[in-house]
Amino acid sequence: MSLHSHLLVEVQNILRTGPAAVALCGMGGVGKTTLAKLLFNELCAEYEYTCFVPRCTDMKNTKEIEDKVYSSMHHLGKQLTQGVEKWKPTDLRQQTLLLVLDDIDNGSHVALLEDIASKNDCANSRYIVTSKDKDIWNSLNSLDSYVFDVKLLNPKSSTELFKSYAFPNPTEPSPSLEDWVHKIVAKCDGLPLTLEVIGKYLKTKVSESIWMQCLHALDEAENVVSLDDQLWAKLRVSYDRLGSQEKNMFLDAASFFSNSTWKLREAKACWRVLYGLEDLRWQTLVDLSLVYNVTEEKSIQMHEQLRSLGIRLASGWGTGGRCRTWTPKNVPSRFNSSNYNERITEGQFYSNDPGSSSTGMATHIEALGVLVQEVIALRLEHSWLLDTREDLANIWRDIGQMKKLQYLDSEVSMRDEVGGKLPKIVILLRLRGEVNILHDLVDRGLARSLAVLDLRAPLTCLPTTVSDFQNLEVIKFEGCLFVGLPEAFGQLSRLRHLTFTLCRLLRSFPEAFGGLSRLRSLKLHRCWYLEALPDSFGNLSQLQSLVIHGTKISELPESFVNLSQLQSLVIHGVQISPQLQSLLIHGKEISPLRQLPESFGNLSQLQSLEIYGKKFSELPESFGDLALDLMLIGMSSLIALPDGFGNLSQLQRVRIHGVKISELPESFGNLSQLQSLLSAKLKNLEDINTLEGSQSSENQQATMQSGDAKETVSYAPAKADRTKSNNLFPKQ
């Protein structure tokens, strides 16, 4: 069924014909963010630049929000920071922009929006915000705007939505449950989030006693005075029915992994060690709508109100014998003075002092006494609170008391003494500074518990007993100074994801490297002296993604063709597996790569290809044997396309820019599936017809129903040559 479908249409019409900015306002859980995502997905193909910034209230200040805007910016559907082309914020000037700022809550956020709009200086740009407080919108001065109240659902719509979750099949509930349906719907007060969570909890439940218990819990929730507390009490009905391991995973997700740089794959690596059956337990949380269904390459996402519920639940001391969250009421009074007010969440100390440029860790954790021993997770960030070596010594003395610490995420530069302080059950570890942590962990018998390691340190060597880290699934080395890896590194049988960044002295890998039988992704970034991959590289039978950039590697080993699972390859200057589906080739001046081999046409599974570089002058004739549906070319020395180009029978979208092509081959007319040709930057080409690509209905037709799509932002490529039309939003 459609949720707020009339409002979706109304807002679209206003954006197409009216003011530059709209604000979607309403209470938490009413559907503001879902509506904003649907609007974004519907409209993004009509703009050159697009950006969706979620949960602005989670960010420390407007500078962080602004940085997020520019780091998340997409151009023609492609994220700029991930591509080859360089860009700067001034490129936005007088270019059409669609920007969504989700969950703003103060006047400084509004001022930031005005500043971005002023710099953009384009009358055809559009801005969407969501907020619980529509009064802050009164401070908007420089933009024409319209405020929409996203209201609660009426009883009929509430019942329909609830039934779509509780009874997903077309069959109606049994007569014995029909009365319970109406009673429970009435207790949900027209809030879509509550209707969804309770509906999914009751899905497949046929026992009237379960429905009665659920109704009783909702009755008790109404005794809570605060609206937010009342909503959380209702949402907790689903949480309370989880098993203990699923509860722990939900609390970990809400108070540590969500809204962080950690991905789902890293969380699952930890949960595999802690709880087991992590895929099944995670799917339970997804099925109950307690978390969003994201891929393992994405960070964990959940509804703002459910995340708040998780943090609230984690704030109780001693839950299950453990403590996740420190709140002001738990902290001694010395931490609650008017100019030193801190909220301590999951071991994070958030300073509200206006002089603080970022969040920070209090240096006197020992004041918390025995409570420190209950902490499960701790995040340390750069702060003015940590100015001296004595401060660091205090921290590590106190961390040594955290006997139940499982997650330690530190951006603070540390010293060697850290290894002697960590408890033996640390599962996730991110450390920065002059540390030689791996040797200490092995010596103290901590190696077997560690599942995720992110280390930025001038480490000169790895221990020869590195194979003791048998549970390690994710490793990130940055700025390390080792020249090579020990043979024992190939015995890390559980390792799935491995990254080397700025390891500038790294020269080679041992032959045993091919023993990493479960490795799925490998990134080699700016390891300037790495000259070759071992012959055993082809033994990485599970490798799916490979990125090589900024190395001395000039060719891949012959065994490379054995990587049958490889799906994505990004190579900057290297010479390739017929099973590839996505390929980015970048040849800069420093790269030895000048042309593609004639055998390139053997990549029969290749669907998406991007080629950039100044030294490429031609494409091989075998190019026409590919099954591409998307192609981006930026080759300034390219003077002609091969005659076989017209044989690309599956090609749907082409973007060609910065080339010296003067004419297209005659076979170009054979591209029967071609929907979009973006050629605005072609030189010496006058008679080319720019095709207006028809957009996929999957991208363009969003629904407000439950399912995977509603919580996903889709950056569809902009329609070709749209700027030539006077009508920014042409009728479909």
Image (cartoon, helix red, strand yellow):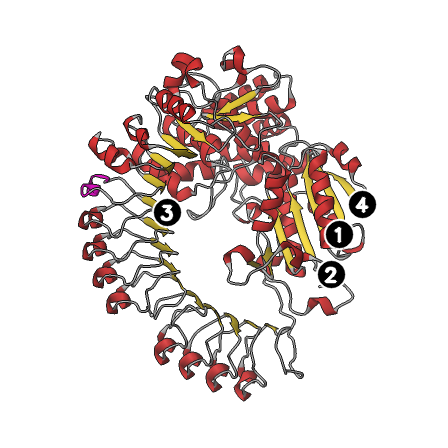
**Crowding at mark 2 (Cα within 10 Å: few <14, some 14-19, many 20+):** some
Q: Which residues are magenta?
A: 464-469
Q: Is residue 321 visible?
A: no
- Mark 3 vs mark 4: which is more N-terminal? 4
- Mark 4 vs mark 2: which is more N-terminal? 4
Residue bearing mark 3: 479
**Crowding at mark 3 (Cα within 10 Å: few <14, some 14-19, many 20+):** many
For residue 15, the mark is 1
> Are circles 2 and 3 on residues that touch, CB within 8 Å?
no
- Mark 1 vs mark 2: which is more N-terminal? 1
Q: Give me the residue at 59% from left, 38% from top.
A: 55
Kindly report which numbered mark, 1 or 4, lies closer to the viewer in this rendering. Answer: 4
Q: Amino acid at mark 3?
A: Gly
Kindly report which numbered mark, 1 or 3, lies closer to the viewer in this rendering. Answer: 3
Q: Relative to 1, does residue 249 appear above or below in the rendering?
A: above
Kindly report which numbered mark, 2 or 3, lies closer to the viewer in this rendering. Answer: 3
Residue in front for this viewpoint, 237 or 275: 275
Residue bearing mark 2: 729
> Are circles 1 and 4 on residues that touch, CB within 8 Å?
no
**Crowding at mark 1 (Cα within 10 Å: few <14, some 14-19, many 20+):** many
Q: Give me the residue at 38% from left, 77% from top.
A: 601
For residue 142, the mark is 4
| Residue found at the far bottom of this picture | 666
